[in-house]
Image: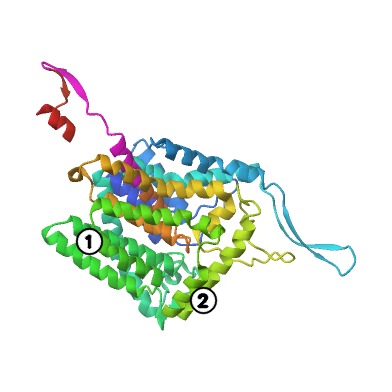
Amino acid sequence: MTWPLVCVALFRRLPIERAIIWSILGGYLILPPVAEFDLPLIPSMNKDSIAALSAMLGCLFVARKPVSFWPKSWSMQVLLAAFMLVVIPTVLTNREPMVFEVLAGSEPIRFITNYLPGMSVRDLLSVTINQIIVLLPFFLAMTYLSSESGLREIIVGLAIAGLVYSIPSLLETVISPLINIYVYGFFQHDFRQMIRDGGFRPIVFLPHGLWLAFFMVTALLSAAALARASKDKARLYWGGATLYLLIVLNACKSLASLSYGLVLTPVMLLLGERTKIALALVLATTAITYPMLRNFGVIPLDAIVVQAEEISPARAQSLEYRFNNEEQMLDRAHEKPWFGWGGWGRNLVRHSETADILTVPDGSWIIVFGTFGWVGYIAQMGLLAGPILLLFAYSKLTPRSEFSPYVAPIAIILAATMMDMLLNATLTPFTWLCAGAVLGYAERLRFPAKTPEKETLFGKGPVIGQPVRSSEKRSLL
């Protein structure tokens, strides 16, 4: 309840780019997980939705700045429309309730044990509002964080937040993950899952230790990007921060996140900008096509589990458990493949008599696919991967000297998040913020703002004090 007031202070005292970033990133890192306000007629308000909504209201009513809600690229317009409109057929095709019952012996007597309601017009309103709230960071970043300064603020914000968050994270590796209990009075997950390799995984105020580990990956990659882009003492400072965050990431005890860090940190430090964008496109394409390959049985799941067992039997067992859950949920999703099962947990596999949940969804993709079907899945993943594709296409139109050194690292972070979403539900408001920033920058390349002109003694020319593009410089010369 206090976070909107914090956001008001941020928008009054900071530039709009920093106010947007810290309103969303600060809420994600500081506010209590799991807890939410379940109000009537609107979706439940948790740390993510409260931070996103506060940032939007702060931008509109405190900073008094307009926000663009419509991309310029027609492909993104189609995906955005599909993301919003898929709610209608999803609700209309899930009006029937789900009744769980037990037959009494051989007699035709039925005892209803549980009940899931069908979706109604009220759900249509609630889910639509939720879809809008989810995209608020996307719109804010597309409008105000797609410039050179905005992109740099994102990278700096992630790196600084990672350095600050590393202190309680390292503390929890020693004393065990207790900070959320001390501050908010409860533990947000299964404590046994925070015990790993004879020590503890940190979790602080995030939903799971895997979320914290992946956040440290984004902080590490951001510090490496700043080390690459900086000079003199700043490069030395960010180089040291990169090494330190790599040590912190190792202490988080997540093999997948550590692998991302070890593979992508040299990419940030050594490769060129367009090569990074190409790699980001490969990762995003792999992530978006994974469910299709799963449906056709192309992914060698057994071979992957065998390879994981050679590294760690415990991690192989966890991976096999995830794959088995995905198989059951895929069978469930195939019953309504186009628009999904909707909300109320209708997409989950349940016991036919007791309604007990038999599957635990981990990856974001299977949750979206089961809830909104193929249309919702393609719309959501397209809004995340589309900016990278457009950036790859439009970057060829821009000279290397004029290309931002910060957009490619953000594209890599976005693509790595999409890969992690295959196994974990690590889609956060800051992921949408990165997608919006990349899309805004790509559209700036494709649709550059025209330089204002005025009549002069020698005809029309650029207004004094306005930036002049390189093409105009050549024509003036």
User: Mark 2 is on which residue type?
Assistant: Gln
- Left/right placement of residue 394 relative to residue 127 reads left
Q: Is residue 456 magenta?
A: yes
Q: Is residue 36 magenta?
A: no
**Which element type, helix, strand or loop, lies under badge 1?**
helix
**Which element type, helix, strand or loop, lies under badge 2?**
helix
Q: Residue at x 64, y 56 (%)?
A: 346
Residue to which mark 1 is pinned:
269
**Is residue 191 something one can see in this rendering?**
no
- Left/right placement of residue 35 relative to residue 476 reads right
Nearer to the camera, 64 or 431: 431
Furthest residue in direction left, as rendered: 477
**Is residue 211 something one can see in this rendering?**
yes
**From what the image shows, is residue 183 above or below residue 228?**
below
Q: How many marks?
A: 2
Dividing the image into 4 quarters, which one contains the C terminus?
Answer: top left
Residue to which mark 2 is pinned:
317
Give the alpha-carbon distance from disc 2 to disc 1, as whole Å. 34 Å
Q: Which residues are magenta?
A: 437-458
- Left/right placement of residue 427 relative to residue 403 reads right
* Quadrant position of residue 266: bottom left
**From what the image shows, is residue 220 above or below residue 250?**
above
Whole-percent x, y for residue 442 in the image: 32, 42
